[in-house]
Image (cartoon, rainbow, N blue to C red):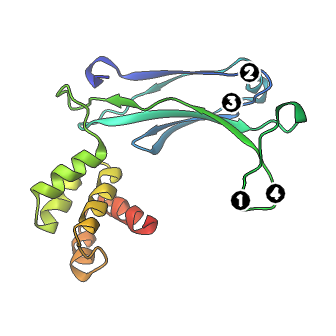
Amino acid sequence: MSAAGASVVDVRVLGASWIAADRVVMLVNGREVERAAISPAQATRVEKASLRWALPARRHDYHVVVIASGPGPTHPSWAIARPYQPTDITWSPQVFGLTAPIRVDADGDGVYTSAREYARQLVDRYTALPSLLAALAEHDAVVSAHAAELLDERGADLEGAAMRAALASASPSVREGVSAYLSAR
């Protein structure tokens, strides 16, 4: 989708009457940017919600996913299997439905570029850490997380003194992305 031709996303949450949805969220590059509650009166209707959300204005390509979810049915006619390896003794079934990723060509070049590809291009282009972090500041935290992963794969010391010093003056989105990668690895 070209960002030039679209500024909103229309969301319709549809589902069987015996499946309830109580919330819907919009994610951009995997980060929640919009959230709406679905009223109990609407939750069991076939059309559970009809929403219009603004697409973010960004200079770089991104993807959008919308997820509707709610409590799963507990009656035996529509049972949801329990997890094979439960992590908790309580059971709270959940149902969800989601869109496929909607790719937005925000830079208007006619080609969708993923957050990981932006990160690869920047890591390849900037060999000096301060220059790389400055370039990453123009992107969201997800690109910085991918850049941290790529640097890690190339043997960079992401927890060393040089990285800590460079991150101290980096933008909040860069610090957030690198921190997210370090927490997840």
Find disc 3 in the rendering and name its residue: 38
Which numbered disc, 2 or 4, marks the residue that appears first in the sequence?
Answer: 2
Which numbered disc, 1 or 2, marks the residue that appears first in the sequence?
Answer: 2
> Quadrant where the C terminus lies?
bottom left
Between the C-alphas of marks 4 and 3, the distance is: 25 Å
Splitting the image into 4 quarters, where does residue 56 fall? Answer: top left
Mark 2 nearby-residue class (10 Å; few <14, some 14–19, many ≥20): few
Discs 4, 1 touching: Cβ within 8 Å: no
Residue 132 vertical placement versus 3 (above, below) = below
Instruction: Say whether residue 48 is visible.
Output: yes
Q: Secondary structure at mark 2?
A: loop
Find disc 1 in the rendering and name its residue: 85
Q: Secondary structure at mark 3?
A: loop
Between the C-alphas of marks 2 and 3, the distance is: 15 Å
Kindly identify the amino acid type of the residue bearing the numbered disc 1: Gln
Q: Which mark is residue 16?
A: 2
Q: Residue furthest bottom?
A: 161
Kindly identify the amino acid type of the residue bearing the numbered disc 3: Ile
Between the C-alphas of marks 2 and 4, the distance is: 26 Å
Kindly identify the amino acid type of the residue bearing the numbered disc 4: Thr
Q: Position of residue 136 (x, y in %)?
A: 22, 54
Q: Position of residue 85 (x, y in %)?
A: 71, 59
Residue 76 vertical placement versus 177 (above, below) = above
Between the C-alphas of marks 1 and 2, the distance is: 29 Å
Mark 3 nearby-residue class (10 Å; few <14, some 14–19, many ≥20): many
